[in-house]
Amino acid sequence: MPISRKRRPRRSRHDRRRAPRTNREQRVRLESMRSLVENPPDGHDLDCLIRAVEAGGRGDAEGSLACELAGSVILESPHRFVLKDLVDHGERAPAWAYSRWCADLAYRSMLLAEDPRTDAAVRYVLAALYPGSLARVLDDKVEFLVLGTGVAAGDHLVADLALYEFGGLADYISERAEAGLLDRTDRIRDWVNAQMRAYEFVGVRGCRLVLHDLVDGGEVEVLNIGAMSQASDEALVGRLVPITCEPGLMFAARPISVDPGTARTVAEAVRTSEPLAWLEALSTALVAGRQAEGFHRTAATPFTSDLPMPAVVVDEAAPAEEAGRIIDLRAKGYSAEVANAVTVLEVGLIAAEISDRAAAAASPHIAAAMGTAGAFEAAAMECTGTDTAAAWRVLAAVVPDHIAERCRILARHADSAGGSPRRARRTG
């Protein structure tokens, strides 16, 4: 379905408040994209990227990260942190995280190959969801390329179109991915036909999000890894894909948070079965003023979580004041990352003592903290007082499978005579 250019909508005062303001981080990003357009990567940098993707195609996460870091690093790019998260999980990384990585590698392969489907995806997304930005740069070739490059690199809907609507993921699986990668994935071949749909949030049930499918009216349970952590409107647009662990479904990537009216418009569009009708529906919501430009852009997340990655520091700055508990842990020799993870786990234990509902709300944060390299070992030392065993078992019931076993191990450790006498404390 062709998407026509829309007149830039007049936004309400409420929408203007929601629109992202230009700040230093955004200016740094724009300058970086402008530099990338005017000074493309040299042969060495491009070779590093190619070797990183090739290593990924073999399933070698550590080798892929090493190759990527060997070239010039775009400071504000979160990708190296996303990949490091997968490496930090090691053999405990869930298979579905490798499926997410496989999809990411498929798109990066398309970009490196200058696949025309990526250009088509950029054009569709620009026309549908960037009417204001597009109007401002149409007469400036460099600025137009800056916008297009930034959208291609940072707008997940471009990757979504290229991979699913235009067949890039299916081609990568059949033509480029090797057994070393595919054998570690979870039902990745069944992901290629995933459909974009709209859902209303119903509630949390254990380690599951309960959603109402607005397309067919059914109720679905989805693995809870943080999709609702910053979703204020209680409606989501995204692709559900099959996985082998309970509850059998998850989002292929962090979904878009939208208002209920937009979600219903998307659902109605999907029911027409017209190609890209859901994208036209998102565009309609933008033009109608229900959403501000950029509403669909989700934060960068690890492959193992739908919680946004921490903001990437782009320059030297004074360290933020640390909480007292973190200072205590740092004094014991723990890194800042591990100390922060331990405090998150301690808060999770407190939530588990309050109620199952509170524990379920903390579940994505517990999973993310436990994925920090060294956090599990530190938790065994710092968070396994004899009065924490029951709380660890409560958490085991509300976190994904790959984290639940670690919680059960910590519960057994707390039951044993070797457990630390310290009780989990509130941070601050």
Image (spheres, rainbow, N blue to C red):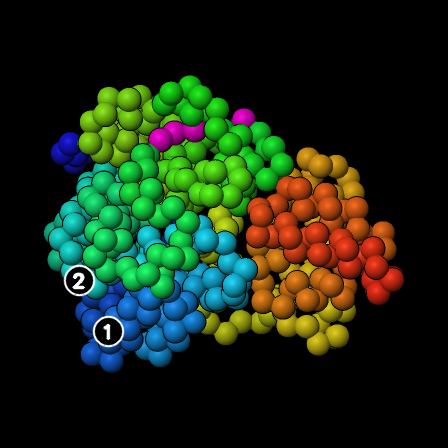
Mark 1 burial class by Cα count in 10 Å: few <14, some 14-19, many 20+: some
Q: Which residues are magenta?
A: 197-202
Q: Do the CB atoms of the residues marked 1 and 2 lie less than 8 Å apart?
A: no
First of labels 1, 2 by sequence position: 1
129 lies above or below 140: above
Asked whether 201 falls inside the magenta stretch, the response is yes
Q: Residue at x 33, y 61 (%)?
A: 179
Q: Which residue is mark 1?
A: 46
In what element is the residue under mark 2?
loop
Residue at the (71%, 62%) spot, across then down: 379
Quarter residue 130 falls in: top left
Report the number of numbered marks.
Answer: 2
Q: Residue at x 28, y 31 (%)?
A: 278
Which residue carries the number 2 mark? 113
Point out the frontmost of discs 1 and 2: 2
> Observer-nearest residue: 374 or 45?
374
Query: x and y percent of residue 343 in the render?
Result: 70, 58
What residue type is disc 1 on?
A: Leu
The answer to whether residue 267 is visible is yes
Q: Say what amino acid the circle numbered 2 marks.
A: Ala
